[in-house]
Amino acid sequence: MPGRLILCGTPIGNLGDLSERALQTLRDADVIACEDTRRTRKLLTHFGVSPKELVVYNDVNEGRQGERLLIRIDTGTDVVLVSDAGMPGLSDPGFRLVRACVERGLGVQVVPGPSAVVAALAVSGLPPGRFVFEGFLPRKKSDRRRRMAELATEERTVVLFESPHRLEASIADLLEVVGDRYVAIARELTKLYEEVRRGPLSEILEGLKANPARGEVVIVMEGARRSPDDVPAAELASSARRLMASGVERKTALASVAKSAGVSKKRVFDALIDDRS
């Protein structure tokens, strides 16, 4: 009977965030595949886990090591995949191994755990309902600015990873390419020196010049604001009707929708009239 690939989330900083299920999964694993044995062994030692077998699976060896792991899973071995921190596969090795297992009909399971993406989004103060995760920005300046230009019209909240030594340059590029957007810079999440800086890119940039950020960093940036002219009349009418259906007076509903969309109350009123005809 084939084994399984089990994706196991691990703490992004505070070791107390490891779940009981994740701990039991690590104890039961036939093989634990990790990015760095030193970091994973530190986690295992903290919880008194003696791995049956610990192997390296990272960006450098994922081709040949992935094939070895696939063979072992196919012949009955349960392989638990972890990253240095958070969920494997998100800006960490793992995606290709998961896809290969799926293509070969091998079982893939997940043991959810901490994620810097979700943690940063939750504390950012920016709308979390619709967001896009872009991972690390390109290192080369021209490629980085090209990626930023693609994000300039993205209306969803944007989540990015960045290294501390490139953070100031990336914030300066963002300010120039996308404008003075509101951002939250979250660093060292769940750790002793956890910090979240919030404000317009221009203020964040000045703050970084005076007090550079250290440690692992997540950037959460507000999405592009639509021009009032781009808001469809049907959307204005629908928003107003929802408010009125919930008991809000028409005058108040018109004012609320107009303020939210950045349009005049007359335009919302006209949209309601046109919607009836």
Image: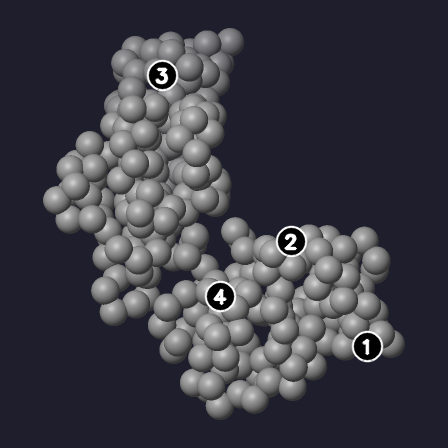
Give the residue number, with chain letter if any, for mark 4: 84
Q: Earlier in the sequence, mark 3 or mark 1?
A: 1
Q: Earlier in the sequence, mark 2 or mark 4?
A: 4
How busy is the neighbourhood of tag 4: few (under 14 within 10 Å), some, or many (20 plus)? many
Image check: 108 left or right of 274? Answer: right
Cα gap from disc 1 to disc 2, whole angstroms = 21 Å
Q: In the rendered structure, which amino acid carries the disc numbered 3?
A: Ser
Q: Secondary structure at mark 2?
A: helix
Q: In the rendered structure, which amino acid carries the disc numbered 1?
A: Gly
Query: Which residue is at a point 59% across and 55% down the rendered structure image?
Result: 59
Q: Are marks 3 and 2 in contact (CB under 8 Å)?
A: no
Query: Which residue is at a point 28% across and 28% down the rendered structure image?
Result: 175
Viewer can see residue 125: no
Cα gap from disc 3 to disc 4, whole angstroms = 42 Å
Q: Are marks 1 and 2 in contact (CB under 8 Å)?
A: no
Cα gap from disc 2 to disc 4, whole angstroms = 15 Å
Residue 65 sits in which quadrant? bottom right
Q: Secondary structure at mark 3?
A: loop
Query: Measured from the top left, where is residue 173 in percent x and y?
Result: 32, 29
Viewer can see residue 37: yes
Determine whether 256 is above or below 169 in the image: above
